[in-house]
Image: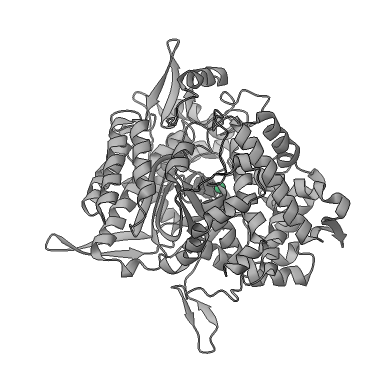
Amino acid sequence: MRKFQNFIFITIMISSLSFSCKPGTKLSGNGEQVDTFKYIVEQFADLKILRYQVPGFDTLSLKQKELVYYLSQAAIAGRDILFDQNGKYNLAIRRTLETIYETYKGDRNSDDFKKFMVYTKRVWFSNGIYHHYAKDKFIPEFSQDYFKQLIANSDQTKLPLASGETADKFLAKIMPVMFDPNILPKKVCLEHDKDLVLNSAVNFYEGINQHDAEAFYDKMRNPSDQEPISYGLNSKLVKENGKVFEKVYKIDGLYGPAIKEIVKWLEKAAGVAENETQKNGIEKLIAYYKTGSLKTWDEYNVIWVGDLKSHIDFINGFIENYEDPLSLKATWESVVNFKNVEATHRTEIISANAQWFEDHSPVDGRFKKKQVKGVSAKVINVAQLGGDCYPSTPIGINLPNADWIRKEHGSKSVTIENITYAYDQAAKGNGFLEEFSYNKDEVDLVNKYGFITDNLHTDLHECLGHGSGQLLPGVSSDALKNYQSALEEARADLFALYYLMDPKMVELKLLPSTDAAKAEYIKYIRNGLMTQLTRIQPGKNIEEAHMRNRQLIASWCFEKGKADNVIEKKVKDGKTYFVINDFEKLHKLFGELLKEIQRIKSEGDFEGGKALVENYGVKVDPKLHAEVLERYKKLNLAPYSGFINPEYTLIEKDGKITDVKVSYPVDFIGQMMRYGKQHSFLPTYN
Ligand code: ZN
């Protein structure tokens, strides 16, 4: 599970809790921090490209640096897999756009060419032709005729043609996919009255409808299995000649050429592992990639979750199922990271008190874990992002996802501090906070406590929220089907929100005062009821799980607190604001909703979960939406961010590695073209 940046723009002034001075900032003569690192690189469409630094890399030993280097190579090696998973024409389209970018002989300064570049950058950013967040297809703003002209004036021998295919035939195939809004319009369809599989363009199923897929996997499940494997996680389900079967992702199966490359780097990584446990883990992961066995995948996860000693850590695999409308199949991703020792002190306090939090939560006793096992939490800095974590990246991750492993062996939870820090730096002084705050008090509270409570919210969400609670015996972990992701995120958020205002936070010295929690409450409610709508196109409803979760929580509390005027909708100078009048009552409402959602999860109450999500999390008030978009437009900001990766270079002398250097490119296009050339291993169609 992952957590994305909750609040589109966060502005900070670090107050009583001290954080170390980050690289890239230095103290000027009068003690004020001066930024020397350029965080924002460029902005286009609704996206901006940021950079992050890797503080502490230079303090690693040579062996550790080598390990980061090999794991980073493995993290980029699977990039093509994600493109293909996100849609079967994505690699063809990306390679065509790259050919044009590289070889087009016409005018590169025209408006049309600029539009072509925006489209190309969006495809790179989204790892395909669907919006990375909204999941719907974005259409080029240049004409089909212009596209043909681009092709005609580019090197056609470099187009990704199938054997015997002419350029004209090729264009007739991909142009409707690019330009026709009615063809494969959505990557992931979550409209419950439609066939979710047939209406999703994501490339996990072929020739299959929802019923086929559900029947196929229902047959496999054994409700009494105490250690159920994650059926369907690493395969494409196809129907050929009337027969339904899986094409498994493995070294000699689907996506084999990319997996072979990943394995090559993992083998090198195993050779410089920090300790035996880590080495065993990497070798188990290699075995999984070679066999495709999901039992081996579980064994790997058990080793991985038990590895708490290694300084360097990583994930690499088919992990999250957000892109599958049936929540079975996982996209490929990788994150390489190492521990931020100082900041980890915060999460260690939380982990050490995990049982206390579980025991005191407002949840029904039957649904609580009697013994919370191995909630390990740390703050990390990422060194490399890959697959579904790149360029758009989470700020917190909690794994593994298999419920039985979480219950028996615990989970590892991380907050990614160099990413949240980059977000913070990039958001400074952009006017967003002022525009949507009702008064200066709100602005001041958020400025004073925003960064601390944001990070703490992430810590609580990841290392306690997702790890809390238990299913009743016999309840399947995917009983909530297409509502599972939204409800699971809501559960984790509510756990965090509820405890932020608990006196325990102050007692444990995690917050300077209960007032600090108010900053998070203000931002959360405002975001859930209003500002996250900046991410939604006019006329559209909310589809993405995290966004559904946030609106669900905020609008449920708004409605339930109406009688007591807990949250008040105010209009000033024609602008709408949501103001919290009673923080203590809101705290209680968070507790009530947490109790209900835990019940729904523990009992597998599909209808109850569906009603909550559909009634509170999906529908958008068109009038408020229009107003928010209008106010937001005036700020000229981009609602989504992604990151350029650092680049690592081996320094060798007389055939021996003597050092690994890190550098921070500023060129998004350059990195994308380099990845497309040097880290692309799959055929155009798989
Ligand atoms: Zn989460």
* Residue at horizontal 72 percent and vertical 69 percent from the top: 443
Does residue 220 sit above or below 119 in this rendering? above
Q: Nearer the viewer, residue 679 or 380?
A: 380
The quadrant in which residue 292 appears is: top left
- Image coloring type: one colour
Q: Nearer the viewer, residue 1 or 90?
A: 1
Extreme residue toward the bottom, this view? 29
Q: Nearer the viewer, residue 469 or 548?
A: 469
Does residue 239 sit above or below 683 in this rendering? above
Extreme residue toward the top, this view? 242
Please identify the quadrant where the C terminus is shown.
Answer: top left
Residue 225, position as x, y percentages in the image = 45, 26
**One can see residue 377 in this view:** yes
* Residue at horizontal 23 percent and vertical 55 percent from the top: 272
Extreme residue toward the left, this view? 654
Residue 640 shown left or right of residue 108 in the figure: right
Residue 393, position as x, y percentages in the image = 50, 52
**One can see residue 40 in this view:** no
Residue 628, position as x, y percentages in the image = 75, 53
Residue 66, position as x, y percentages in the image = 26, 58
Residue 319 shown left or right of residue 466 in the figure: left
Residue 321 shown left or right of residue 649 in the figure: right
Number of labels in the image equals 0
* Residue at horizontal 79 percent and vertical 65 percent from the top: 438
